[in-house]
Amino acid sequence: MLKKLIINNFAIINQLQIDFRSGMTALTGETGAGKSIIIDALGLLVGSRSSIDFIRTGQEQLNVQGLFEVKSGSPLFAILDEYGIAHDDNQLIIKREINRKGRNVCRVNNELVKTNVLRQVGQFLVEIHGQNQQQELLDEDNHIHILDRFADNKFQKNLVQYQKLFKNYQDKRSRLRTIQKNSQNLVQRIDMLKFQIEEIDSAKVIAGEDDQLEDEKNQLSNFEKISSSLQESYRGLSENNTGVVDALGNVRDQLEDIMDYDKSYKDLYDSVNGAYYQLQDNASTIADQIENLDFDEDRLDNIQKRLITLDSLKKKYGPSLDEVIEFGRTAHQELSEIDIDDETEAKLEKEIENQQKELIELGKSLSKQRHQTATSLEKSINHQLKDLYMPNAKFGVNFTSLADDNLTVDGIDQIQFDLKTNIGEDFKPLVKVASGGELSRVILAFEAIIAEKMNVETIVFDEIDTGVSGRVAQAIGDKIYKVSQFLQVLCITHLPQVAAMSDLQFEIKKETVKDKTETRVSLLNDLQRIEAISLMLAGTKVTDLTRKHAQELLELAQGEQQRLD
């Protein structure tokens, strides 16, 4: 149980220390005084999410510390041993610090731990019930888990067995989906490779072919210009008497006559003579080219089509024909190496089929046990609801069996809590018919039943009595007190009937100190409790009559405690 809570720099709390005892403790005070802040701080100690927004204005760091006394034999000790946390006695000290840089430090018995470890430890120390828990009951997906909390150990073992098998089943289904997806991808890849290979191979690509074809295309495309230029060139070189060759021949003959008179003439003759024969060769070459010129329009058309094919291949598989050829070679190799493992896929399908059958059988067994638990739970809840002044209300558990191919980690059942609040009405989903006050009483009915079985040692009710008054408020106070016979109970309440049933009552007030708001907590003595409960009864002004009424309420509460003890 929680023995001491120390809070520093948390929201509007500057410094606060509260010493708790066993039994039922009420936290009372005006709205906004900081009651829920204390519960938020306690939540941090047992692993709830942190936020720098919790840090008091003007401060750099908050810290919360709790001293807990753990029952001998608690399963918590196994968790501590698992993480190497020393525990010489039954006391546990938890500390948590948060600074504005987001640093979050958690310690259990001075051992640094991660938040997830703190959460595991906290689940055996404190359970907090408030608006979130009402939302949990209003979420039908949670109903199966709530029902399972009331089942016996045999069911819990069977559920663990089922869930282990279900995980294996899910893993295999996931693996099969991956294989099937990969197989589908491989089939698509094979089809693509075959198409690419066929396209490249059928084209019979030759390296450098495109350059040769471009040259030939240029000649055929410019045939007339080439023919005209070659003929004009030939005439310019070889025309009788006026051609360049004949003219240069005359120059050569003149130089030949004088070359013996001076070496320079001889050199000049040799140069002109070489040019003469070179021009003769050029003229002969041009003549051959003119003779070989042949315009073939079909050939030009075929070349253009071939170049279009080659350009298309280069756009798809590489900027050059060499890369197109290499792409085809690589595609051939990849295709030869692809292997689709049909045997593994078939084996997995068979294993999944067998596991599904086994899960269905285990699920049926779990469902049978759940029906038995549901019958017992319905009876117990309905008994509790009568005590809470809902005599005509009936609680029911509605089962829907899931299809064989729609198994879940929880089995074959879909659970829905139903409620009817008046005689003659049909059952309707709890989430649709319960008012705030009715929902609070249903939650309390659940807690009253499970209190003896809970692993936690402290339970917190954060305004669970919202929406009720009068004799219903007294009945809720009785139930909470009854729960406190098994667990330490901390209860935030605005109801005087509930506060009067507590063993201890702390009053939370908000004060202004040096222009800053602070929360103060006081343990009330008997006279102070009369004043506090008088204020809860009166709302504003306390009179002697309200004090008398408060004293009577406290005396009646003592009588109720003795009756319930």
Image (cartoon, grey):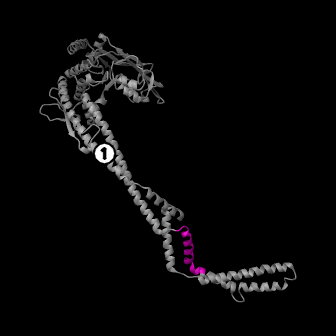
Q: Which residue is located at x 22 percent, y 31 percent?
A: 435
Q: Position of residue 164 (x, y in %)?
A: 31, 36
Spot the residue most to the left. 424
Q: Going by the image, does 199 lie left or right of 274?
A: left
Residue 259 visible in this rendered orientation of the protein: yes
Exactly how many numbered labels are in the figure? 1
**Residue nearest the viewer, comparing 543 with 491:** 491
Q: Is residue 390 left or right of residue 116?
A: left
Indicate the position of residue 207 as horizontal and vertical percent values: 54, 67
- Residue 407 screen position, x and y as percent: 27, 41
Let me know if residue 127 is in the magenta part. Answer: no
Q: Position of residue 416 (x, y in %)?
A: 22, 36
For image coordinates 14% across by 34% down, the residue present is 425
| Element under disc 1 | helix
Label 1, on which residue? 351
- Looking at the image, which residue is at 54% across and 70% down? 209
Res. 518 in view: no
Compared to residue 208, the image places residue 528 above or below, namely: above
The question of residue 214 being in magenta is answered with yes
Quadrant for residue 380, please give it. Answer: top left
Residue 273 or residue 183, whichever sits in front: 183
Q: Which residues are magenta?
A: 206-226
The part of the image, by quadrant, that contains residue 92 is top left
What is the quadrant of the N terminus in the image? top left
Image quadrant where one finds the C terminus: top left
What crowding class fits label 1: few (fewer than 14 Cα within 10 Å), some (14-19), or many (20 or more)?
A: few
Q: Main secondary structure of the magenta part?
A: helix
Q: Looking at the picture, which amino acid does disc 1 mark?
A: Glu
